[in-house]
Image (spheres, helix red, strand yellow):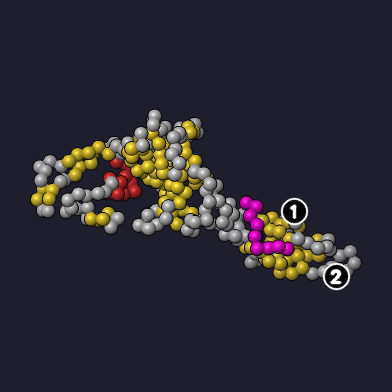
Amino acid sequence: MTINDRKINKTATSNFSIQEILGDNHLTYINKTIYFRLGYIDSFISAEPLAIKYAPCAPILVDRTYIAPDCKGGPIKEITAYFERPLELNETLSPMQIIPFPKVNGDPIFFSQQEEITNLVFDATKNLWAYKFKNLDSGRLINNRRYIIEYQAKKYGVPRGTLQSFEPFIYNDPTAVQFEIVSAENPLCHDGTVEIVIRVKGGTGAYKFYDDTIEIIPTPINGTDGIYHLKNLAPKDYKIKVTDSNDCIDTDKNE
């Protein structure tokens, strides 16, 4: 039998965690008895199985929030870990980190909070104790990859358990807002109006159109294939900008 490419049976000293054996649903075994048969080669030494109670010393992470970035390449808005109890006297969490899930040897670690966490904040709405990650730069995450929270608990500096959150989150980088001016014609008659035709794609939700910082009202008429018609405009120079519902813009445009 192997775990993470390590052979754990028929060895003089096996090295593995209970979580590695039980898998992603290991939290369902908390405070339950697990039985092991101990033996050597093909002959069992122990007449009775070894019974252990799966009761972690570390506080258990029972919930988490993940709020994705608003715009392409933007920071993750929030990752908060929620625990079923506060930290005990002289108990710390370090490191508290985000890792790929499932983690493969050589995969990088993200958002590692190396400073010792000595206190959790009580969240009355959830009746749980919370830790909120800081400085969530998403630049090194892989799009559409799953990630999970992992943490190490210590008491008086002595490690007492490494656990992971039970539910991964998927990092999805939003699609960028992109637009192009299809046409912008001069007025046909004196004091006539003009029409600007724009093709827009990407982003999140409904688009808003601006002349520099002034929103163009009413909202342009949406045709087909992302074509928008800005009608009845006064003839002048326009500095067109387009945003989505999160106020993300096309960063490549300088019009």
Task: Say which quarter of the image contains residue 47.
Answer: top left
Region of the chain picked out in magenta, as a range: 245-255
Q: Quadrant of the N terminus?
A: bottom left
Q: Residue furthest right?
A: 190
Q: Residue at x 22, y 52 (%)?
A: 8
Classed neighbour count for the residue bearing mark 2: other residues with Cα under 10 Å, few (<14), some (14–19), many (≥20):
few
Residue with the most extreme top position: 89
> Disc 1 marks which amino acid?
Thr
Q: Is residue 188 left or right of residue 122?
A: right
Give the image location of residue 2, x and y in percent.
Answer: 24, 56
Image-based side of 85 in relation to 38, left or right: right
The C terminus is located in which quarter?
bottom right
In this rendering, would 16 be left or right of 78?
A: left
Q: What secondary structure prevails in the magenta region?
A: loop
Q: Nearer the viewer, residue 60 or 107?
A: 107
- Taking 51 as reference, is 232 above or below it? below
> Is-magenta flag for residue 251?
yes
Answer with the quarter of the image where residue 210 lies. bottom right
Q: Is residue 68 covered in magenta?
A: no
Give the distance between the C-alpha atoms of the residues marked 1 and 2, in whole angstroms: 27 Å
Q: Which mark is residue 188?
A: 2
Numbered disc 2: secondary structure: loop
How many marks do you count on the picture?
2
Residue bearing the label numbered 1: 213
**Position of residue 96 measured from the top left corner of the image (x, y, whole percent):** 43, 44
Q: Secondary structure at mark 1?
A: loop
